[in-house]
Image (cartoon, rainbow, N blue to C red):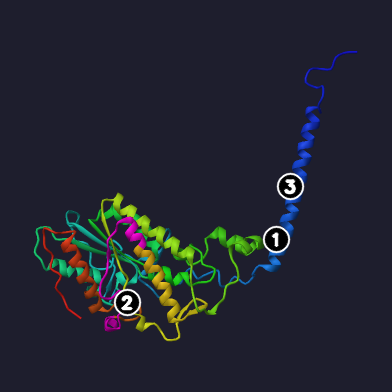
Amino acid sequence: MPARPRGQAGGPRPRRRTRAWIRLVLVNAAVFAAVLVVAEGAARWLAPRDLSGVFGDPQTFLRNRPYIVPHPQRGFALRPGYAEGELHINAAGLRGPELPAAFEGRPIVLAVGESSTFGWRVGDLDTYPARLQHLLDRVPRHVPPLVLNAGVPSYTSPQVLAYLHELLPRYRPRVVLVTVLWNDALFACLPHWMPDYLVHQQPLGWRRFLLRHSGVYRALAIRPEPVGRVESVHNERALNLYADNLAAMARDCRDGGAQLVFVRPSMDPAHIPAEGMKIGPRIVPPPAFAALLAEFAATLDQVAKRAGVPLLGHRLDAGDPAMSRFFIDPVHPNGDGNEVIAEAVAAYLSDVAFPAEGLASGGKQP
């Protein structure tokens, strides 16, 4: 009897083995597909189908703001060359007059942030960066510092971070002043919070597609959350993202050779409406909103301490009722309030950033 070929004895032939593996893969794929169909059906039945509270309005911060234009990375930006009344955006997209011809030889103080830096409902000369420039100019110096106002209304921390990526190599500032907190806190009040909201005001395209067409993804990504009046708001994810963005600003400024200073945000609880803050489909009563702001302020303190970044306070950051006359609303100082902030910043710069020059703070006193 002839001997079997070597390798065939005691086991299935290679062709049979391949067929067995194919059957196993097909059976498992069929089982997986069946599980997905069942899960999708159950999710579509149980998961929320009303997505009106998930999809925001991408035109929110463009509508009725002719000085704002869309921006691919930052969501929106100031319109270069815009001018109306006491509001001017220069050719570089910064608020205020055109940059002087020889500004490259001057030490730059870059103020970045949201509407309180931009100067909400005040003229060009009454923003806090403009008041700061006036205070710096009061002391004659061979090479005077130049203050640039890179504030953009409604900016959040990821937008400020993205803007810094553009501005640091462009201007190589000696000092960067960052004020950002309010808008991160406001977005944190929205149900179904997602980090996409802070830049684009709605989920990104791939997420929008899955939310509309996949019940399983809806069940994983969102859950029913109360709307209307809510007695407390705590958003751990929003706080963590805020902290991460602040820490990234510190790293970027350090790598770019700039001294970063966090400026505490101005706030006046007396201007918060008695019925609460209406934020999307929710109304957050004053005590709950004040507690949320305190959480974000504590996060700012922690990041500044860990990163070794100075955190500059002023008389408008503590919610003192005596300071209410310097506010337009709960967030935004008027021109005299911006002077108060500018005085604190100028005094700090005179001690730290430009010690040899001896800056004078001066200005009005409340």
- Residue pictured at 28% horizontal, 77% vertical: 122
x and y percent of residue 234 in the render?
48, 70
Q: Is residue 244 left or right of residue 140?
A: right
Residue occupying image coordinates x 63% and y 64%:
219
Residue 137, quarter of the rendered image: bottom left
Q: Which residue is mark 2?
A: 332
Residue at mark 1: 40
Magenta span contains residue 324: yes
Q: Residues within 10 Å of mark 2 (few under 14, many from 20)?
A: many
Type of amino acid at the residue the image marks with label 2: His
Gap in Å between the C-alphas at discs 3 and 1?
A: 16 Å
Q: Which residues are magenta?
A: 302-326
Q: CA distance from mark 3 to mark 2?
A: 59 Å
List the residue tagged with mark 3: 29
Q: Earlier in the sequence, mark 3 or mark 2?
A: 3
180 horizontally vs 354: left or right = right
Callout 1 amino acid: Glu
Q: Viewer-proximal residue, 266 or 155?
A: 266
Estimate how packed mark 3 is, as few (under 14), some (14 to 19) or many (20 or more) residues with alpha carbons within 10 Å: few
Label 2 residue SS: loop
Up-down relation of residue 297 to residue 324 (above or below):
above
